[in-house]
Image (cartoon, rainbow, N blue to C red):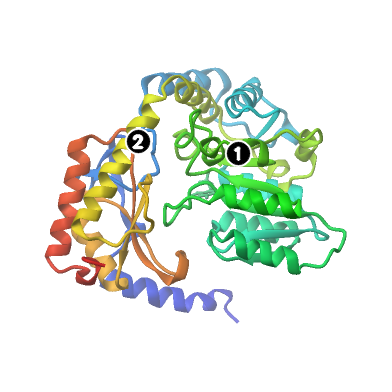
Amino acid sequence: MDLLAKLEGLAERHARMKALGGDAVGAVMERLLSPTRAIIEGRETILAGTNNYMGITFDAECIAAGQKALAEFGTGTTGSRIANGSYALHKELEQEFARFLDRRHCIIFSTGYQANLGMMSGLAGPRDTIYLDADSHSSIYDGCTLSGAKLVRFRHNDAADLDKRLSRSEEDGGGKLVVLEGIYSMMGDRAPLADFVEVKKKHGFQLLVDEAHSFGVLGPHGRGLADEAGLEDEVDFVVGTFSKSVGAIGGFGAGNHPYFELLRFAMRPYMFTASSSPASIATSIAAIRKLAAEPQRRRRLADNSARLFSGFKALGLELGCDEASPVVAVRCPDEPSTIAMWNALLKAGVYVNIALPPGTPNKMCLLRCSVSAAHTDADLDRIIELFGAVVAQGHGKKVANG
Ligand code: PMP
């Protein structure tokens, strides 16, 4: 039996998509000109699908910090911190993040994916139960699988449904971990944190919030949804990534628990993989200092998100959520029209993300945009104009006017 035979369905789907002209995975950025511009298929293209929320990837100080670390610490760490040792840079980054997050402890990981895997499997074990929002990111589901904990899913953003499920659960002596996201990565909506905190007061679970898309973006200090909602004391553990607002690679977990540091010896995705490269760690340190010192980036992102949201609304596009968000999902009727629109947009000079089932909630077909603080008004108006033109040309006709 050929082990890869099970990929036949995937091969057929891939071929079908290619025949429709939508090789989204195959789109190559031949050259990056800025956080919001790349050369794709030989054309200068506006990037509106990068998660580069703060537009910090070409910042001169971040680049200089990365270059200096490359020269001083070399190209790679060549091992895990547990087996091969920590660099001063690791410690500095953890201290910098703990300070920014106003948490006693912070542990950094090689990616945000590993941060979720590590934190969830470190916190919960086979005797515990993890309650997940149905729309949780794959890294959260995978973290749950790795932990061996019992998984209970509740309806997306529905605190009453979580309440019901917790009320029904029998006391088994195990711990309970509830996981939410600050901004959901596909639809751009936020968790109604205050509602969940009410349920927490009633049932007494521990709460982890993945602020991957909201870190640097929301709140008076840029710490995410809990910062915005004034509910940080109710959140036991925060997870996030450096791959979005921070413009590098890596992830973090943070908390105040007196045993938190011991998680380093209980998280396989921390212990058994190489720590991220010196250049990436150093650019993250420079970036977090910038995010702390330049709140205007957050304000600019909020203005830009509002501009794209209202422009799309005026076109009659059906969006993933009812509030301005740096993640803007345009709902499309079906796979062929999504691919046709994606292609037409790329040819016209704007790059967005295709998101199709099973990677989307409720089998939706989406063109997912992410807004950057580095987008100019003219960029955003051009993106809106091109979406309008593509819809008017009949690609994804049913999208217009809902
Ligand atoms: N959590 C969420 C909610 C995400 O959207 C992502 C990445 N898109 C991750 C975690 C993983 O982050 P990373 O890319 O750093 O692995």
Q: Check disc 1 and give the amino acid type.
A: Leu
Residue 28, position as x, y percentages in the image: 31, 50
Q: Check disc 2 and give the amino acid type.
A: Leu
Residue 119, position as x, y percentages in the image: 69, 46
Residue 42 in view: no
Residue under pointer 1? 231
Residue 11 falls in which quadrant of the image? bottom left
Please tell me whether residue 309 is drawn above or below residue 216 in the rendered image: below
State the SS at label 1. loop
Contact, mark 1 vs mark 2 (Cβ under 8 Å): no
In the image, 398 versus 359, the foreground residue is: 398
Q: Is residue 389 left or right of residue 171?
A: left
Q: Of label 1 and label 2, which has the lower sequence position?
A: 1
In what quadrant of the picture does the N terminus appear?
bottom right
**Residue at coordinates 75% horizontally, 38% vertically from top-left?**
264
Q: How crowded is mark 2: few (under 14 residues within 10 Å), some or many (20 or more)?
A: many
Q: Does the residue labelled 1 lie within 8 Å of ligand 1?
A: no
Q: How far apart are marks 1 and 2 (CA)?
A: 22 Å
In the image, 289 versus 114, the foreground residue is: 289
In the image, 399 versus 287, the foreground residue is: 399
Q: How crowded is mark 1: few (under 14 residues within 10 Å), some or many (20 or more)?
A: few
Residue under pointer 2? 301
**Residue at coordinates 48% horizontally, 29% vertically from top-left?**
220
**Residue at coordinates 51% horizontally, 30% vertically from top-left?**
280
Residue 268 in view: yes
